Image: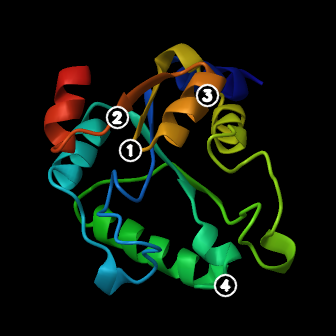
Amino acid sequence: LKFAKKTLMENLEKRSVILDRDGVINYDNGYVHKWSDFKFRPGVIKALKYLCGKSIKIFIATNQSGIGRSLYSEKIFFKLHKKIKTFLSKHKIFIDDVKYCPHHPKFGNKKFKKHCSCRKPKNGMIKKIINENYLDKKKIIMIGDKKSDKECAKKSNIKFFYVAKNLYKQVKKIY
């Protein structure tokens, strides 16, 4: 019980950042799902390293309707994220969690064609991140590149920033 209380208090005291993926971490060239197509945006590696150095928890929340549209599978998505995490770990960068939404209300196929609570601008992914990690909303920021990201943050009652040209310079100003 003491350990659980201590862990809960530590998480509530930690600052956190939730990043959109495509357009924030990597260039958004449309349905990026291969490592060979995944190109980090300026300052991202340095920004993530800086955040880790400050003990700021890092989360990714990303709409991935390419899965729902059958452009790539969840297995391919997981494979890409394993490569991303392996690459980042070599730089001593660790992502605390990745949440994704494979659904699309119009263009999804079969089980993925639906209105859901996780697809941004809805905030199901953010709620999961907060609840599963016992985070304090007052200590969370979200960085995105679309209006749907901003709306999601607003619904979640967390501070939002549109991504700047250089993520490192941006997070350095924030933290």
Q: Is residue 137 above or below residue 42?
A: above
Identify which amino acid the numbered label 1 is placed on.
Answer: Asp
Eye-nearest disc, 3 or 4: 4
Q: Is residue 86 above or below residue 127?
A: below
Q: Is residue 52 visible?
A: yes
Residue to which mark 1 is pinned: 145
Label 2 residue SS: strand
Asked whether the residues under the numbered discs 4 and 1 touch, taking CB atoms below 8 Å apart as contact, a structural biologist would say no
Front in this rendered view, residue 6 or 114: 114
Asked whether the residues under the numbered discs 3 and 4 touch, taking CB atoms below 8 Å apart as contact, a structural biologist would say no
In the rendered structure, the answer to whether residue 28 lies left or right of residue 142 reads: left
- Which residue is pictured at 79% across the width and 70% down the height? 112
Q: Label 3 vs label 1: CA separation?
A: 32 Å
Residue 168: image x %, image y %? 17, 40
Q: Is residue 133 above or below residue 59?
A: above
Residue 29: image x %, image y %? 34, 71
Asked whether the residues under the numbered discs 1 and 2 touch, taking CB atoms below 8 Å apart as contact, a structural biologist would say yes
- Which residue is pictured at 72% across the width and 64% down the height? 103
Eye-nearest disc, 3 or 2: 2
Residue 90: image x %, image y %? 25, 67
Label 3 residue SS: helix
Give whichever of discs 3 and 1 has the lower sequence position: 3
- Which residue is pictured at 64% across the width and 76% down the height? 67
Residue to which mark 3 is pinned: 7
Residue to which mark 2 is pinned: 162
Residue 70's mark? 4
Identify which amino acid the numbered label 4 is placed on.
Answer: Ser
Q: Label 4 vs label 2: CA separation?
A: 29 Å
Front in this rendered view, residue 79 or 54: 79
